Image (cartoon, grey):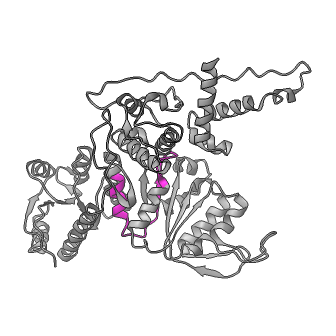
Amino acid sequence: MMTSDTAILMVEDDPASAMLYEQGLLPSFRNITKADTLKLARQRFHEQSFGLLILDVRLPDGNGLDLLKEMSEDDRLIPTIVLTGQGSVKTAVDAMHLGAMDFIVKPCSPKKLREACEATLARRQKAAAVPVAEADEPGPADAPAAKPKRGPSGFLGESAAMKNVFALIEASARSDAPVFITGESGTGKELCASAIHNTGERRNGPFVAINCAAIPHELMESSIFGHRKGAFTGAISDHVGAAEEANGGTLFLDEICEMDLDLQAKLLRFIQTGSYRRVGDSKDRPTDIRFVCATNKDPLDYVQRGKFREDLYYRLHVVPIEMPPLRERASDMAMLARRFLKDYGAVEKKAFKGFADDTMTIIQNYHWPGNVRQLENVVRNIVVLHDGELVTPGMLPRLPQAPAAQPVAAPAGAAVHHAPPPAPVAAAPVQAGPSGDARDLLVRPLAELEMMAIDAAIEKFEGNVTQAARALDISTSTIYRKQMAWEKRKQDG
């Protein structure tokens, strides 16, 4: 039994339960302050510093989760255990979304509550003890040096949005419940899935990822479940699928909404029974895995349109985690940019030390449609193509503009330098030849066709360079490099 001087705020409206829980926490926890209403809890919280919150949901004057929400919005979130007599999955998910680290259904024994308090504080202390790498030393015009906040499994972020993600990862680590990750492309959904695996009880087991959008539909079933020799043309030997490879660990199904409906039915049975059958086999094989899935689509929209099974959605959508877009992580932009600059500078053996003030202002004002992945690629592009101590605005590659997007506000007191939107590199007008032959449209310099294809792809995906590159089967750095070359040729006349 551990002994702790941690100050605890216990919010419980039933006097008998509060007294019982307090006695159960003694002598392990000696510094306990009680509140029986939401109003009193707010008052106590603002009067004193606490290291742990035990929070009842149903209070005489409101919902206890409102306090959790206020703490998160004010960036004053502390380790929280939610107590409630209403043990619904929705309440638990709402509590974890707001940053709760544990959820206990009443009635619970004083011993169980004490053990939960000890485990919660132990996890927080363990997370605080993770070594944090020093941020790069800033140049004369860069922001002050600071240590980047590192979340589970190497995540970087100090914004309230990312702290909520970290809390959800930590809260779900002890469970085997399926996790459903949503978010735009480039927000770090696979990194989130990996963090869930690495911080959980299955961290010593395998982590197997399947991209449902990258594998042809006819091969997807074999990729997940495996196949027997001769099951179909080309099956020249037995094949072990992801379900078997992930036994004892985690199976991550990325872009889950792209899966065929027929295979969704088989996946549902797999989740329900814990067993699968290889293609061409008659034998069921048991396996023990945790399911984590992700999508950059709106899964409920796919359900309503009949493209995703509703029963599968609710089977997988137990612990939802939404990855915030980079434009909602304004306080993380400078940290991430400096980290990428340091990492790629070391790889490329370049002498960059930081960003000029006006460069950082442009970065923080840009809407980043490709999110963290786009920022990383932009910084890598700079490091590869340039050299120096400070990154200047002229080193930035052309950044696609989204007319409907609003720029992220610059930090208070900072001078705002609005980067003029780059003029599009216009290809020559497309006209048929004198013969009217449609093939004349394609008989033109390859560089011109290349320019037309890239501009068309970027326009189709509304400025998302990552999606455009994926559609063209090239890297984002290739797009940026070619755009720079076109722009230079245009300026040179």
| Range drawn in magenta | 164-189
433 shown above or below 460: above
Query: Which residue appears at 36% of the width and 40% of the height?
Result: 334
Q: Which of 337 and 320 is in front in this view?
A: 337
Query: Which residue appears at 92% of the width and 21% of the height?
Result: 435
Residue 29 percent coordinates (x, y)? 11, 70
Q: Which of 76 and 401 is in front in this view?
A: 401
For the N terminus, the image quarter is bottom left
Q: Is residue 48 visible?
A: yes
Q: Which of 448 and 108 is in front in this view?
A: 448
Figure quadrant of residue 4? bottom left
Residue 186 percent coordinates (x, y)? 50, 46
Magenta stretch: residue 470 in it? no
**372 left or right, relative to 165:** right
**375 left or right, relative to 168:** right
Residue ranking furthest to the bottom:
283
Q: Can residue 88 be seen in this view?
A: no
1 shown above or below 136: below
Residue 84 percent coordinates (x, y)? 25, 63
251 shown above or below 77: below
For the C terminus, the image quarter is top right
Figure quadrant of residue 211? bottom right
Residue 358 percent coordinates (x, y)? 37, 28
Magenta stretch: residue 173 in it? yes
Query: Which residue appears at 52% of the width and 31% of the height?
Result: 399
